[in-house]
Image (cartoon, helix red, strand yellow):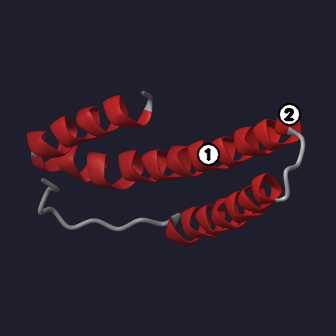
Amino acid sequence: MASTHTHTHTETKQVLDRLSRAAGHLEAVKKMVEEGRDCSEVLIQLAAVRSAIQNAGKILLQDHIHHCVADALATGDQKVLDDLSRAIDQFIK
């Protein structure tokens, strides 16, 4: 369940841009598979997609820490910290 606190993110556009690029890249990888391209090439491109998604997550995490978590610390909102801990556990699996 998400926290009900209000927050602002300054990097939303950057995250969305990176996710859009990753989605486009993933579509290109899908086409590579459909065309029967070399498996090694496909694996390298999948690694690039995974890296792009990880980088988007890193930007989002940093933005969350700088805004939501900072606000939560100021107001004593422990739930935000608990939610962050759970999200990090899922993100780094």
Residue marked by disc 1: 55
Q: Nearer the viewer, mark 1 or mark 2?
A: 2
Per the image, label 1 sits on a secondary structure element best described as helix
Q: Is residue 61 found left or right of 72 in the rendered image?
A: right
Q: Residues within 10 Å of mark 1 (few under 14, many from 20)?
A: some
What separation in Å lies between label 1 and label 2 (alpha carbons)?
Answer: 23 Å
Residue in the image at 85% along x and 51% along y: 36
Q: Nearer the viewer, residue 16 or 37?
A: 37
Per the image, label 2 sits on a secondary structure element best described as helix
The answer to whether residue 68 is above or below residue 85 is below
Q: Nearer the viewer, residue 34 or 41?
A: 34
Please tell me the numbered disc located at residue 40: 2
Q: Name the quadrant containing residue 50.
A: top right
Residue in the image at 77% along x and 58% along y: 34
Q: How many marks?
A: 2
Residue in the image at 12% along x and 50% along y: 75
> Where is residue 18 drawn, in percent x and y?
64, 62
